[in-house]
Image (cartoon, rainbow, N blue to C red):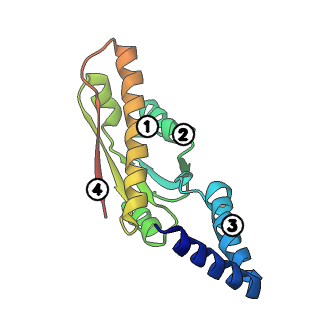
């Protein structure tokens, strides 16, 4: 680049800034404001996901699995879910993002060393948030599996989480 041209552009810009000093303030202030907002005020973390639990088993094993969800910082249990219609209504009303359904034979299957299917239904209207919630649920289920395997002394993971996004 020619030094003479660079000097001409610098002179033109300095004249513009002298005529309108607010433009310099905006040119510096807006990026600084965005840095502060994106650095401190805005967060894209998904936590405290509203969760409805349908525990059809009602056993200590199913309560331990639910406690794993309650103990994580990612999920917050909301009321409802006594029936499947009630649980789906919570999703439709946007009072819950995820429904966890534990079948009646959950504890028996775990005790027998078989796979215990658990259903997790996520509201897929916001697919990014649903995918993050599904990932968190897999982490909780995997940790629960590892605790069971450690207690049993090894073997195949007994918990089979099947996830469906609506």
Residue 10 position, x and y percent, is: 62, 74
Mark number, residue 72: 2
Residue 51 position, x and y percent, is: 49, 54
Q: Which residue is mark 1?
A: 140
Query: Distance between the Cα atoms at labels 4 and 3?
Result: 40 Å
Q: Is the residue under label 4 in contact with that under label 1 (CB below 8 Å)?
A: no
Q: Is the residue under label 3 in contact with that under label 4 (CB below 8 Å)?
A: no
Instruction: Classify mark 4: residues with Cα within 10 Å, few (<14), some (14-19) or many (20+).
Output: few
Q: Is the residue under label 3 in contact with that under label 2 (CB below 8 Å)?
A: no
Q: Is residue 3 above or below residue 140?
A: below
Sequence-first disc among 2 and 3: 3
Between label 4 and label 3, give the one nearer the viewer.
3
Instruction: Classify mark 2: residues with Cα within 10 Å, few (<14), some (14-19) or many (20+).
Output: some
Between label 1 and label 3, give the one nearer the viewer.
3
Sequence-first disc among 1 and 3: 3
Residue 72 vs residue 34, the one in the foreground? 34
Q: Which residue is mark 3?
A: 33
Q: Is the residue under label 2 in contact with that under label 1 (CB below 8 Å)?
A: yes
Query: Distance between the Cα atoms at labels 2 and 4?
Result: 21 Å
Q: Which residue is mark 4?
A: 164
Query: Distance between the Cα atoms at labels 1 and 3?
Result: 37 Å
Sequence-first disc among 1 and 2: 2
């Amino acid at each position: 680049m020619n030094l003479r041209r660079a000097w001409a552009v610098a002179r033109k810009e300095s004249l513009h800034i002298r005529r309108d000093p607010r433009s310099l303030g905006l040119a510096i202030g807006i990026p600084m404001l965005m840095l502060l907002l994106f650095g401190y005020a805005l967060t894209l973390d998904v936590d405290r996901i509203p969760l409805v639990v349908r525990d059809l088993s009602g056993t200590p094993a199913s309560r331990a699995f639910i406690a794993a969800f309650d103990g994580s910082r990612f999920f917050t249990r909301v009321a409802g879910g006594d029936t499947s219609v009630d649980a789906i209504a919570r999703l439709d009303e946007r009072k819950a993002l995820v429904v966890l359904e534990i079948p009646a034979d959950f504890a028996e299957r775990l005790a027998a060393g078989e796979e215990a299917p658990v259903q997790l239904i996520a509201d897929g209207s916001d697919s990014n948030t649903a995918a993050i919630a599904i990932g968190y649920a897999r982490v909780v289920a995997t940790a629960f599996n590892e605790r069971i395997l450690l207690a049993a002394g090894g073997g195949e993971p007994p918990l089979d989480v099947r996830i469906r996004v609506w």
